[in-house]
Image (tube, rainbow, N blue to C red):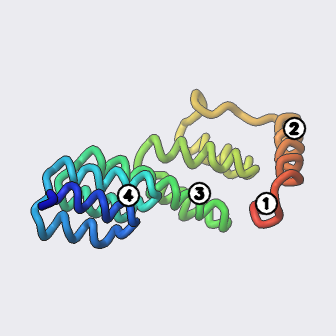
Amino acid sequence: VFGVGYMVDLMIQRRDWSAAERACHLLGASDGTKEALVRESIEGGRHKDARRMAEAWGLRSLRDEAQNLYCRGAIDKFITKGNIAMAETFAERSPDLTLYCCAALLASGLYDEAMRMRDKHSLHHEIPAVSAEERVAMEAARRELYVQLPTHLAR
């Protein structure tokens, strides 16, 4: 006879996430097993599911971690798609996300938007101003990087 934790581990190894979650619910898994499933979900990039499970099981710190990572991913997607307003909406959930969004805007070459956000949220100590010379240097570095990337990864 195998324990619930062992069964959940086997399901995780098979990447059968929904079966692992059902087993936790139906078979009364221990807090440690539930936490392991949430951690595996976070590490596997399944942040939304991890947040939902952590919320249901009362795992507050893991819920907060999953929520933060989910929001960061959403911010990145919105910036990539050019929807800066939605990225900023997600960023306003916490100072950490606001700082992340501003840095992501800078990394994406959206200097004006990053500086506007920097000023709006008083991030002058965390995000330095970007001069015209620095913009030129960063753009040159970005172009060099994209020349080296395979076509499907360059944007």
Q: CA distance from mark 2 to mark 1?
A: 19 Å
Vertical arrangement, residue 142 with respect to residue 125, above or below: below
Spatial CA span between label 2 and label 3 = 23 Å
Q: Nearer the viewer, residue 26 or 51?
A: 26
How far apart, in angstroms, are the residues tagged by discs 1 and 3?
A: 15 Å
Dot placed on the residue nearer the N-terminal end, 2 or 3: 3
Which residue position holds label 1? 154
Q: Which residue is mark 2?
A: 137
Mark 2 and mark 1 lie on one chain; the one further toward the N terminus is: 2
Q: CA distance from mark 1 to mark 4?
A: 28 Å
Which circle, 4 or 3, is nearer the viewer? 4
The amino acid type found where label 2 is placed reads: Ala
Task: Work out how far the residue at label 4 is from the one at label 2, CA to CA, in angstroms.
Answer: 39 Å
Q: Identify the mark at residue 41; answer none if there is no mark.
A: 4
Instruction: Please state which amino acid type lies under the numbered disc 4.
Output: Ser
Residue 25: x and y, percent? Answer: 15, 67
On the rendered image, what quadrant is the C terminus found in?
A: bottom right
Of discs 4 and 2, which sits in the foreground? 4
| Res 73 label | none
Q: Which mark is residue 76?
A: 3
